[in-house]
Image: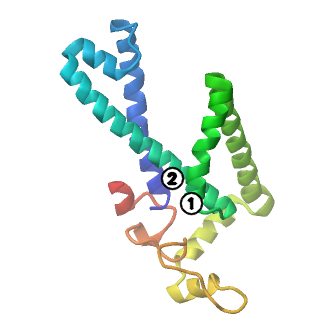
């Protein structure tokens, strides 16, 4: 979806974050001892609604945990080549071990370390791409050039020294983006991005 996909993804997530900020303040005023949504539901609507919310909150937590786990495993796979199944098995064990040893304090420290490492890597990548290797103009022109490639050119571009290509249409960023204005990677006019 190009830039459009990232923008609309973040825009969609920001609505919940903004609403949660307002709602959290109001909840703390009205129910200062409540810790979870389910506690508030039980106090307001009773046991039956509480059990229903427990079920749906458990499902939501399982879905989010699965998404985070598979996203982390895919990242480890992309960076190291480790099998996704192995990474999906090892990542939770790492979290379980440092949480068991250090408790909640270890979790907070680990989160701060993760964020710091991610920001350092991000700054290094941005500096490398936009300052050491090229400029913003060159990156933009490169993205415009990639848009004009045909499938045959993409196949040659992703070929090894023996001429064997590992290019798969839709798997790699090469050629025009279907649904984007003029196939561009840097447009906000994207039918897929708007639906996303």
Helix, strand or loop at disc 2? helix
Helix, strand or loop at disc 1? helix
Query: Which residue is farthest bottom?
Result: 162
Between residues 192 and 52, which one lies in front from this camera angle? Answer: 52
Q: Is residue 68 left or right of residue 106?
A: left
In which quadrant will I find the N terminus? bottom left
Q: Residue at x 43, y 48 (%)?
A: 9
Q: Which residue is mark 1?
A: 84
On the image, the x and y values in percent for residue 133 come to 78, 63
Q: Are marks 2 and 1 in contact (CB under 8 Å)?
A: yes
On the image, the x and y values in percent for residue 34 come to 38, 12
Mark with earlier residue (2, 1) = 2
Between residues 190 and 10, which one lies in front from this camera angle? Answer: 10
Between residues 4 and 66, which one lies in front from this camera angle? Answer: 66
In which quadrant will I find the C terminus? bottom left
Q: Which residue is mark 2?
A: 70
- Residue 164, numbered circle: none
């Amino acid at each position: 979806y190009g830039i459009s996909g990232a923008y609309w993804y973040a825009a969609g997530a920001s609505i919940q974050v903004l609403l949660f900020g307002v709602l959290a303040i109001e909840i703390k005023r009205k129910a200062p001892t409540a810790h979870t949504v389910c506690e508030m539901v039980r106090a307001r609507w009773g046991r039956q609604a509480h059990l229903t919310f427990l079920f749906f909150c458990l499902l939501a937590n399982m879905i989010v945990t699965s998404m985070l786990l598979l996203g982390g495993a895919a990242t480890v796979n992309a960076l190291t080549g480790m099998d996704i199944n192995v990474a999906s098995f090892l990542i939770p064990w790492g979290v379980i071990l440092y949480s068991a040893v250090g408790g909640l304090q270890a979790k907070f420290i680990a989160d701060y370390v993760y964020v710091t490492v991610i920001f350092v890597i991000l700054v290094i990548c941005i500096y490398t791409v936009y300052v050491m290797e090229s400029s913003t103009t060159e990156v933009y022109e490169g993205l415009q050039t990639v848009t004009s490639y045909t499938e045959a050119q993409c196949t040659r571009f992703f070929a090894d020294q023996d001429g064997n290509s590992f290019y798969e249409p839709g798997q790699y960023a090469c050629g025009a983006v279907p649904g984007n204005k003029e196939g561009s990677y840097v447009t906000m006019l994207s039918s897929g991005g708007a639906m996303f």
